[in-house]
Image (cartoon, grey):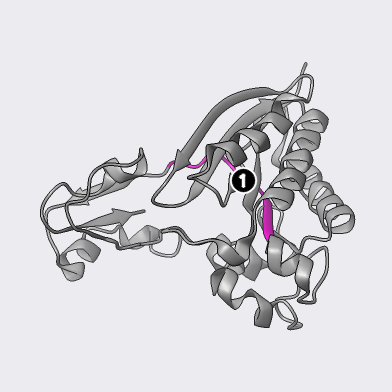
Amino acid sequence: MKQLIECVPNISEGRDMNIINQVVAEVEKVEGVKLLDVDPGATTNRTVITFVGEPEQVCEAAFMLVKKAQELIDMRNHHGDHPRFGATDVCPLIPVANIAMDEVVGYARKLGERIGTELNIPIYCYESAAFEPKRRNLASCRKGEYEGLSARIVTEEWKPCFGPNCWNEQVARSGATAVGARDFLLAVNYNLNTTSTRRANKRKRPSDERRWQTKWKTYEGRKRKSYYDSRYFKGNKGYWLVY
């Protein structure tokens, strides 16, 4: 039976549709890959792209997407409301049908190695594709974000799994990419009628504390500019809590 996997790369561009469309076009060029969704966010300055297909074709589409993002996005000029450390910030592979996670891990690591070798982009393998436990968590790999990458990438503890472990002009432009294998991810946003972080944190499930991330942004009554803006609390002042 046909094996299917999904890929959900997040690129660090959510405002310039010309760039977004050029990156998405690389996916559509690969025969056998189905583009499912393109979700740009102006506030986050980030676009989530979702496509599905057989493993080899999906990995080829992912590689071409990362290559085009490297060409068009300069991380030295990037600003947004979402943690990030690369032009293609994350590139997870997800098993969909007739394929085990162990096989997806192999594809993710092979894809990461190809990106690191051919495109000279530092690669961190995370979740099930991680080579060591401390790198399973994306937040750990991305700690310090792009601004802290130049100091982190040269250390023995956090040198990339693949690609260069030095800071040069090319890496400064592309940043790093996290390539992983994981199950489906459900992201839930809550709008809370409070400005108290204490009250909001009481609503977090303690059992999931290590896997959940809390991010606060002030809302000052600005108009909705994108899908992501609709997630802000619609009051004069409020907060956006993202799990």
Q: Position of residue 124 (x, y in %)?
A: 71, 62
Q: Quarter of the image for the N terminus: give it.
A: top right
Which residue is located at x 39 percent, y 58 percent? 208
Q: Is residue 90 above or below residue 183?
A: below
Q: Position of residue 11 (x, y in %)?
A: 59, 48
Indicate yes or no whether the magenta region holds residue 177: yes
The stretch in magenta equals 176-186
Which residue is located at x 78 percent, y 39 percent? 64
Indicate yes or no whether the magenta region holds residue 230: no
11 vs 186, left or right, is: right
Check disc 1 and report the residue beneath it: 182
The residue under label 1 is which amino acid type?
Answer: Arg
Which residue is located at x 64 percent, y 74 percent? 149
65 vs 147, left or right, is: right
Can you see residue 103? no
Q: Residues within 10 Å of mark 1 (few under 14, many from 20)?
A: some
Q: Position of residue 215 (x, y in %)?
A: 35, 62
Q: Position of residue 168 (x, y in %)?
A: 78, 74
Residue at the outermost top position: 1
Which residue is located at x 89 percent, y 53 percent? 118
Can you see residue 192? yes
Among the 4 quarters of the image, the one containing residue 175: bottom right
174 vs 213, left or right, is: right
Q: Is residue 28 above or below residue 163?
A: above
Q: Is residue 46 above or below residue 64?
A: below
